[in-house]
Each structure stands twice: as structure tokens, then as C-alpha cells.
Image: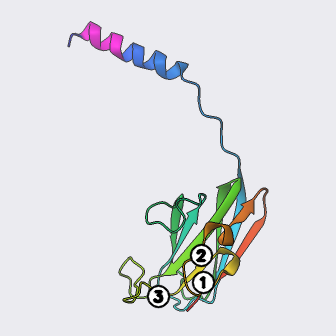
Amino acid sequence: MTLLSFCALLFAGTVLKAATPAAPPVETSSVTVVVSSLVSTTAAVRLYFYNTREGFLKSGKWAFSKAVKPAGKSEFTLPVDLPKGEWAVAITQDLNNNDKIDKNFLGIPTEPYAFSNNVRPTVAAPGFDECKFMVDGPGKVVSIVLKD
């Protein structure tokens, strides 16, 4: 490739990039997630944030996740900025630090878990609609009690 054609390609890419309109910024609101009744004060807690029904509780389909070390405490507060809309949170505490939630032969978790709205499933995993909360302004607090 000659220097001239390289410069033309570089210039064309710059012009095209500049001509592409930027996506509008997503409006977010501050949300505080308070997790209490931790089984272990040292084992990592992972929070999975979902914003779609289709992806809820499916591996890798969360919008994002956060890991928190409880630092010797039985509860913690996690501030996050979330785009406005419907959200749900699933939480697990990895007691043996193997980076997965352990389950018995029936598929029932053997490590602590919880859901937003403190949904306590009895037979099957909860649905998004049971666990969802609305983010529509600043100052939202979501309190979740971990299930042993």
C-alpha cells in the first residue's frame, strides 16, 4: 500500500467517523442496594443486574454484575447508577470461593441466594416480573435479605 492510499484511507475513516451521529446519552439514576443477613462475613457476594425478562436468571444474560467482599460485616451497601426502567437483581454468596453457585442433584442452590423484592421461591425460580423494581429517579433503595 502506498503512502498516498494509506493517507486517503485514514482520511476517509476520520470523515466517516465524524459524520456518524453519536448515540444520545442514557439517562441514569442512583440506586442503593442494601444486602443484609450475609451467611459469611468473608465469602464474596455477587450481584447480577437484569433489565430484560428474556435474559433473567440466564447465565451471561445479565446487564452487568458486581462482586463485593463483605470485609467482616454481615451487610453492605452498594451504590450503582442504572438507566431508567425496570430492573431485577439476583444475588449469590460463594461460600467455598469456587466462582459458581453450587447446587444439589435437583438443581437447587446449596449456597445462599436472594432476589430483589425479597422474593422467596418455593418450587421454581422466580420470574422477572416478581423481582422487578422501577428506576425512575434518584434515591431508590433496594433492600435484599440473603437466604441461607
Residue at disc 2, secondary structure: loop
- Label whose residue precedes the other's in the sequence (1 or 2): 1
How far apart marks 1 and 2 lie (CA) works out to 6 Å
Residue at disc 3, secondary structure: loop
Image quarter where the C terminus lies is bottom right
Which residue is labeled 1 in the image?
121
Q: Main secondary structure of the magenta part?
A: helix
Which of the two residues, 139 or 70, is positioned nearer the viewer here? 139
Q: Look at the numbered discs 1 and 2 and tell me whether their residues touch, using CB distance below 8 Å.
A: yes
Which residue is labeled 3 in the image?
111
Neighbours of disc 1 within 10 Å: few (<14), some (14-19), many (20+): few
How far apart marks 1 and 3 lie (CA) works out to 15 Å
Q: Is residue 70 left or right of residue 87?
A: left
Which of the two residues, 124 or 63, is positioned nearer the viewer here? 124
Which residue is labeled 2 in the image?
126
The structure residue drawn at horizontal position 58% and vertical position 62%, both measured from the top left corner, is: 50
- Label whose residue precedes the other's in the sequence (1 or 3): 3
Residue at the top extreme?
A: 4
Residue at the front extreme?
A: 123
Residue 56 is one of the magenta-drawn residues: no
Question: Which stretch is magenta?
Answer: 3-9
* Whole-percent x, y for residue 83 in the image: 67, 52
